[in-house]
Image (cartoon, rainbow, N blue to C red):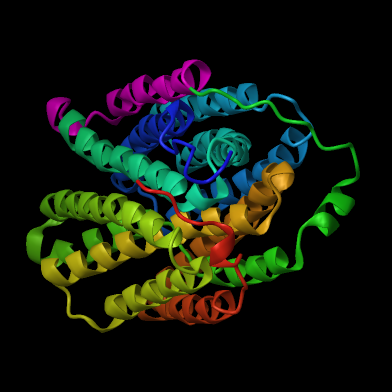
Amino acid sequence: MTAGKTRWLNRTVLGVGLASLFSDWSHEIASAAMPAFLASLGVAAVWLGIIEGVSDGLASFAKLASGYYTDKLERRKPIAVAGYIATALGTAAFGLATNAWHVLLARASAWLGRGIRTPVRKALLAGAVHRSEYARAFGLERAMDTVGAIIGPLSALFILEATQHNYRTLFAWTLVPGLLAAAVIAFLVQERERVPVKHISFGERLRLLPAQYRKFLVGVSLFGAGDFAHTMLILLATQKLTPTLGAARAASVAVMLYVLHNVFYASFSLVAGWLGDRYPKNLLLAGGYSLAGVMTVLIIVLPVSIWSMAAVFVVGGVYIAMEETLEDSLCAELVDESHHGMAFGVLATVNGIGDFISSVIVGVLWSAFGTGVAFGYSAVLFFLGALLIARVRSAPRAAYPPTAW
């Protein structure tokens, strides 16, 4: 493909985006309701951190194995379809839970499927566009993913109101968009012909990844060690607002704030994609990491109110948009296309390990010492990660002249 002649918004880019929308719609219904569901089971904040952390940690190793394995295949798409089906079934299994460890098992199963499909989906997306269009393609995918994350909590509110807070029915409904995601990948995405990489050891494949990519991973891992799951923001808002609003009203407001978070996430994914194809991705990503630090400082210093919580959720949505869009597009830019599966798998594993560490540590620190210590820990790592990412050298801009939208 040559820059200026390719149509970046093709059926594969659209299909991957729609699959992300439907799948996120499915599991965000469950994620929005999970804190309240766990509370109904008498579960403390530390359990939420354990559930999110263990699930993300398990998914990270699935991403690594999937990325390594699928580079050796002529066709990656069937692996993606299987992963989407597993995620849909695991999410719906929340409805069978009667104890916290049941939720952990269901979430871990869903995230195992998510881990299998993630590097494959990203490789399919990167293979469908020119290098000059990576940021826009990944930005659109992140935006559509987040549209699902907006619809998901709203759907959760509607279903809970319609069923008088019947969580079993709510989790059963997640099957509909979850299975639609698998169908879109199966019938809309077109996989380009590719030459599989030769079979070599896992260690050798790691050594083939460029030095700047490895430097990039160090910054990502440092940032990720503080990057807790944003379901914790829902719990934070619920706890902080309950004394003034009451438990039921605070829970509803927290979910609506999460919707606001996702509106900014979706909007700024497109902005980050546009910027990333025109300016150095490493500096933009460092700016996103710094915004994460700003968010945690706001949590610590602002007085509790709906407006201060809204500011936290808005900044959180903006930084996540920049982080996810620019991490993926910078990763694709730093590594040859034939090794994209491995590169995305390693990146996802580093992020998953970071998610495990951060969610568990923030949950424990929160329960033991309060929010100031918990989010202060994250702030330090966010700013340090930003400094390291700013030192990564991305590809020269002249190599990839941007094409028109």
Which x, y percent locates residue 257?
20, 55
Residue at horizontal 35 percent and vertical 20 percent from the top:
176
Residue 64 seen in the figure: no
Relative height, residue 217 to residue 146 (above, below): below
Of residue 301 and residue 14, the one placed in the foreground of this image is 14
Asked which quadrant contains residue 33, the reply is top left
Q: Any magenta on residue 371?
A: no
Numbered label tally: 0
Which x, y percent locates residue 207?
84, 58
Of residue 388 and residue 383, the one placed in the foreground of this image is 388
Which x, y percent locates residue 200?
91, 42
Magenta residues (range):
160-188
Residue 7 seen in the figure: yes
Screen quadrant of the N terminus: top right
* Magenta stretch, main secondary structure class: helix
Q: Any magenta on residue 168?
A: yes
Residue at horizontal 50 percent and vertical 57 percent from the top:
401
Asked which quadrant contains residue 29, the reply is top left
Residue at horizontal 45 percent and vertical 54 percent from the top:
402
Residue at horizontal 11 percent and vertical 52 percent from the top:
249
